[in-house]
Structure formats: structure tokens, C-alpha cells
Amino acid sequence: MPIEIQRLTTRFLQVSLATTVCELVEVLTALPPETRNQWYIVVTLDAPGPQIVASASGGYTVVDTLPGYAVLLPVRDLADVAAAADTGLLDTPLSALPGLLQPVRMIARTTMGEGRARRDWLPGSPGRRLVVLEAATVIGLLTDEERAGAFGGIMTHLFGREQRFTPVAKGRVTYRCPSCPDGQNSYDFADLIDLSTNKLICPRGHLIQE
């Protein structure tokens, strides 16, 4: 039987390879605070990705089809890559972050049921994530993360190697400015980023990152 639509993770945003970190964060911060950390980013690749299809023998096989997709959960995936990157990260397109974009397996919703997809095909897909298609369009994801309680605060040291954002309450992400006094140095990210210049500046005027 087909995978039921209501069983899919539908909190995802689809972006291109040219999307910059700054553009991505601008979109994420506009999402409802109570669910912001639970949204996935589906990146459309310019290379083929593996799609699971029914074979003539009655089983299943994998073929490479265009486009491929990479699936990111910013709370887990962007931080480790960005921590090793240069500090001029806000202007960096996702395609330039090394090791970040790995094509995940794709499956048409009617190819098989959810149980078989999770058991046989999810474990071998990068991040244990499957892209589910309907008429060649992404309609949702199958992942293990929601079940495992993997959602936390956005790993926001991705904006520089020395700084780190810290979630201090559910749905709220703050940044601790190293130049402000202790106890008075926590600010919402939306109050820090100057999208016109791509700089991080605290309300007291401290330049945190060029």
C-alpha cells in the first residue's frame, strides 16, 4: 500500500544550491518560534540522486534520476560543517560548504508502504532521511529524528568559529555577545543580524562579525 500522506514530515523548505547561509537563516527566523527548530531544508541539486523504483522481477532497485536532493536539519547539520569554515560564512552559498550536501534516497509515495520504506531503505540513506515524491514533486520526508527527539536549539555557532548561539527557552534562540557584561549579553538573533550588510551587531553597537 502507498505511504500515507499524514505519516510524512511536511515541515520542510525547498531551496537551491545558490542559497546563502544568510538567506537561509532569514527564512528560518521568520518561521513560528515553537516549530522553527523542527524544519528541514531540502536542497535541489544539479546532480542525479538515487531513486527507489520497482523492478521487473517484483523487487526494488535504485536508479539515478534528476534532480537529486540533499536534506538538512539545521539544528544538527550546519553547525559541524560551519565550525570549520572561514568566518565570512553569511555570504557563503550552501553549495560551497564542504561535505554538507549528500544526495538522499528518493521514493514515489505509491512505490511501497511506510513500514518497508523505513525498514529496508531508510537506514542506508544519508542522515536516515528519505525524500517522498508525488508526480516528481517533493511532498514530504520520512526521517527517524522526530521519533528520536533529536530536535533542539539551532546550532548557531555556524556564524563564526568563536561564537555560539544558545537556546535559553523553547522556541527562542539567543546570542551571547562576548563584549557585553555578563548577565546583560543575551540577545535574540533577529535583533543582531543586519541583513543589509550581513554583519552581526549587538544592540549596544558591538560589531560581532564582519
Image (tube, grey):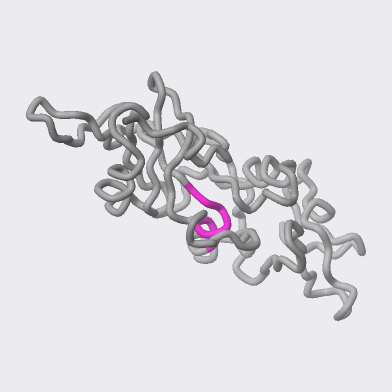
On the image, the x and y values in percent for residue 152 come to 61, 62
Asked whether 192 or 116 is in front, the reply is 116
Q: Is residue 120 left or right of residue 131?
A: left
Q: Tell me which secondary structure the magenta stretch mostly adopts.
A: helix
On the image, the x and y values in percent for residue 151 come to 58, 59
Number of marks in the image?
A: 0
Q: Is residue 7 left or right of residue 119?
A: right
Residue situated furthest top in the rendering? 135
**Magenta segment includes 73:** yes
* Residue 64: quadrant of the picture: top left
On the image, the x and y values in percent for residue 33 come to 75, 50
- Which residue is found at the position 38% from the left and 34% from the top? 3
Quadrant (top left, top right, bottom left, bottom right) of the C terminus: bottom right
Residue situated furthest bottom in the rendering? 182
- Which residue is found at the position 76% from the left and 68% from the top? 168
Asked whether 119 or 104 is in front, the reply is 119
**Magenta segment includes 146:** no
Q: Is residue 26 left or right of residue 104?
A: right
Residue situated furthest left in the rendering? 57
* Residue 200: quadrant of the picture: bottom right
Which range is magenta?
Answer: 72-79
Asked whether 119 or 37 is in front, the reply is 119
Q: Is residue 68 above or below residue 171?
A: above
Quadrant (top left, top right, bottom left, bottom right) of the N terminus: top left
- Which residue is found at the position 54% from the left and 34% from the top? 15
Q: Is residue 180 left or right of residue 101?
A: right
